[in-house]
Image (spheres, grey):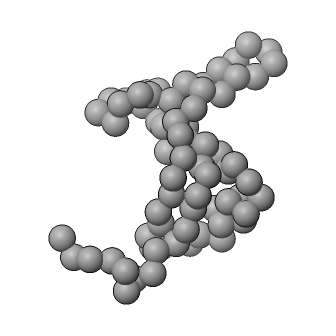
Amino acid sequence: MHLIPASPGVRKALKDVRKGQVVRFAGSRVRVDAADGWHWTSPLTRKDSGAGACEVVWVKDFAVVDKEDLVDR
């Protein structure tokens, strides 16, 4: 996944996350367009694979999950 922060607070949270932490986020898959005509489209399904299967997400809410809140499944 490629994450695009929707606010300065989300940007800071993304920068502060560390390897091994569990995170929870909410947002929308998006298409990114550049002035020169380049674009990057997020797949609309999670069942794709291979080149071009990376999701591009506009992240509106992001948080590190406390280990105490995790439930064994």
- The structure residue drawn at horizontal position 35% and vertical position 30%, both measured from the top left corner, is 45
**Residue farthest top in this picture:** 37
Expressed as whole percent of the image width and height from the top left, the position of residue 71 reads 26, 77
- Residue 19 visible: no
- The structure residue drawn at horizontal position 44% and vertical position 28%, both measured from the top left corner, is 43
Most foreground residue, 62 or 21:
62
Expressed as whole percent of the image width and height from the top left, the position of residue 56 reads 55, 37
**Residue farthest left in this picture:** 73
Q: Relative to 29, is 47 on the left or the right?
A: left
How many labels were placed on the picture? 0
Q: Relative to 48, is 16 on the left or the right?
A: right
- The relative height of residue 37 versus residue 44 in the rendered view (above or below) is above
Which quadrant would the C terminus be assigned to in this image? Answer: bottom left
Expressed as whole percent of the image width and height from the top left, the position of residue 17 reads 59, 69
**Residue farthest right in this picture:** 35
- The relative height of residue 73 versus residue 34 in the rendered view (above or below) is below
Expressed as whole percent of the image width and height from the top left, the position of residue 5 reads 67, 50
- Residue 62 visible: yes
- The structure residue drawn at horizontal position 63% and vertical position 62%, both measured from the top left corner, is 14
- The structure residue drawn at horizontal position 69% and vertical position 49%, both measured from the top left corner, is 6
Most foreground residue, 40 or 44:
44
